[in-house]
Image (spheres, helix red, strand yellow):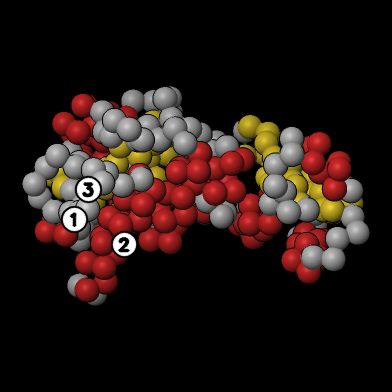
Amino acid sequence: MSHELLIGIHAVEAALNHDVAHLVELYIESGSHNARLKELGERARELGVKPHARDRAALDRMTGGARHQGVVARYDAPAPLPESALPELAATAGRDALFLVLDGITDPHNFGACLRSAEAAGVTAVLVPKDRAVGVTPTVRRASAGAADRVPIVAATNLARALKVLKEAGVWLVGLAGDTQQSVYAVDLDGPIALVLGGEGEGMRRLTREHCDFLAKIPMRGDIESLNVSVATGIVLFEALRQRSAKD
């Protein structure tokens, strides 16, 4: 497990609510009149975590000047799941399986926003490459508003191999690509599927694209050629959710 800082109210609150066992120490700004900080301190005590008072300058030094909102925690982050966990995740979810595959996102704010959308859409797990992509950093945790602690994240040493494992588990792969003709709104997103999106700039890598069963695009009327990956993620996830809800 890696040792890191959780910075800000959302990140610390999520750890208290969902993963308090890995929260090592909690620091709250002394003399603050913020009611949410008081609530966090009381919640921590109820869970057996003693909050330590620190002045704002100490918290600034601890976080390197990041916007901490008066609260910082030391956290032993659990490692991501290995790709060998994919068959069991798919089997447990059954026909409701909904995976999000992110091929090489490097911006932590984008990754955090994708995780936030994934959690809101109830994804089974998020699959990412272990290398050449941003990991679950403190910035990612802040941007995810706690979703990084609630969504299973699978880090694959070989993403192409992991996609093959998903296909063998009965999961269909739908890749998002701007240079195809089929609209994502015309694709059946019900049943066990994985939505595959590329990273910033170049999109999906060739091998990732070749493993997809279908390619689809988000139709756009303006002159912009592509959307930010976190925006595109939200659109396709909630289109899948809409289709599934309509068939319930």
Q: Which residue is mark 2?
A: 238
Residue type at tag 3 = Asp
| Residue identified by numbered label 1 | 221
Please determine whether, in this image, residue 230 is positioned above or below residue 243. above
Alpha carbons under labels 2 and 3: distance apart? 24 Å
- Determine the CA span between mark 2 and mark 1: 20 Å
- The residue lying toward the viewer, choosing from 175 and 229, is 229
Query: What residue is disc 3 on?
Result: 223
Q: Secondary structure at mark 3?
A: loop
User: Residue, x 37% and y 32% (percent of image)?
Assistant: 104
State the quadrant of the C terminus: bottom left
Vertical relation: 37 (above or below) 206: below
At numbered mark 2, what does the secondary structure look like: helix, strand or loop? helix
Q: CA distance from mark 3 to mark 1?
A: 7 Å
**Reading the chain from its start, which is encountered first: label 2 or label 3?**
3
Indicate the amino acid at tag 1: Arg
Q: Which mark is residue 90?
A: none
Q: Which element type, helix, strand or loop, lies under badge 1?
A: loop
Which of 239/225 is in front? 225
Residue 225 seen from this side: yes
